[in-house]
């Protein structure tokens, strides 16, 4: 069932409705580098999950959020026990693991550590920007210097660590509210007629086996 996310804004609403994943309540989720912590809030408010969060920075207001279990860690330093979490979630994080060099070895190491801490037969969900999307490439790659993955490389590193994978591809962006209807027409066109390799998001839903 798709839940409602209107209170979290158009962009987050689009992401979670198109992700359309049925998280089971009361399970334990690790949100890796949730930079604005809205994803974590959605997990807590909408899905009733027990939310853990790691980041390389300790945000100034983190101690006031009593429902969120925070540790200042990065993916290579995670000291959680094996099979600790029912879900592990990454939203636009993986390309930051080694953004300067984009080392294949470091990407595999990070994904292997994520695999280790997720329970068998539970889920790892990776939501990652697509480098050659017509909106992301000029704005995020060329102007803001985000080193997003090409789709083939995203597939490669995921397949080199996991086996039980399903993929989704969709459009989701922050749109000016004044022109939202127009942008939604663009989005629908892209999702209906554009090859997956150009859509905004690559999503890997992994059943950890």
Image (cartoon, rainbow, N blue to C red):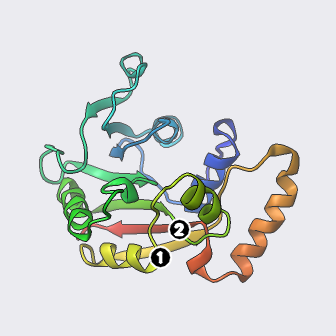
User: Observer-nearest residue: 173 or 82?
Assistant: 173
Q: Which residue is mark 2?
A: 130
* Residue holding disc 1: 151
The front one of 78 and 6 is 78
Q: Residues within 10 Å of mark 1 (few under 14, many from 20)?
A: some
Whether residue 197 sits left or right of residue 122 in the image: it is right
Q: Locate the C terminus by quadrant.
A: bottom left
User: Along the horizontal axis of the image, is 1 left or right of 208?
Assistant: right
List x then y, in percent, for residue 156.
34, 79
Looking at the rendered image, the quarter that the N terminus falls into is: bottom right
Mark-to-mark CA distance, 1 and 2: 6 Å
| Residue 6 in view | yes
Residue 128: x, y in percent? 47, 61
Marks 1 & 2, CB-CB < 8 Å contact: yes
Camera sees residue 27: no
Q: Is residue 173 above or below residue 209?
A: above
Asked whether, in this view, residue 109 is left or right of residue 42, the answer is left
Return the mark for residue 135. none
The residue lying at 52 percent from left, 72 percent from top is 168
Instruction: Describe the element under mark 2 as helix, strand or loop.
Output: loop
Q: Which residue is pictured at 54% across the width and 40% down the height?
A: 46
Task: Answer few, some or many: residues within 10 Å of disc 2's Cα (few below 14, many 20 plus, some between 14 and 19).
Answer: many
Q: Residue furthest top?
A: 64
* Quadrant in the rendering for residue 190: bottom right
| Earlier residue among tags 1 and 2 | 2
In the foreground, 120 or 35: 35
Against 6, residue 102 (above or below) is: below
Classify mark 1: helix, strand or loop: helix
Residue appearing at x 25%, y 78% in the figure: 160
Q: In x, y percent, where is residue 30? A: 32, 45
């Amino acid at each position: 069932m798709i839940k409602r996310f209107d209170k979290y804004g158009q962009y987050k609403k689009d992401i979670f409705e198109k992700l359309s994943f049925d998280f089971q309540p009361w399970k334990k989720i690790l949100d890796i580098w949730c930079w604005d912590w809205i994803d974590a809030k959605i997990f807590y408010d909408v899905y009733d999950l027990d939310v853990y969060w790691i980041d390389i920075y300790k945000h100034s207001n983190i101690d006031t959020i009593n429902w969120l279990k925070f540790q200042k860690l990065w993916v290579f330093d995670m000291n959680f026990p094996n099979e600790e979490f029912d879900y592990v979630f990454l939203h636009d994080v993986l390309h930051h693991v080694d953004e300067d060099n984009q080392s294949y070895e470091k990407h595999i190491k990070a994904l292997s550590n994520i695999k280790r801490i997720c329970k068998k037969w539970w889920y790892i969900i990776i939501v990652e920007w697509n480098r050659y999307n017509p909106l992301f490439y000029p704005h995020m790659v060329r102007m803001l210097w985000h080193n997003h993955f090409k789709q083939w490389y995203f597939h490669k590193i995921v397949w080199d660590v996991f086996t039980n994978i399903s993929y989704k591809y969709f459009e989701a962006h922050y749109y000016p509210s004044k022109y939202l209807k127009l942008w939604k027409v663009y989005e629908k066109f892209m999702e209906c007629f554009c090859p997956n390799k150009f859509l905004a998001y690559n999503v890997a839903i992994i059943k950890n086996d």
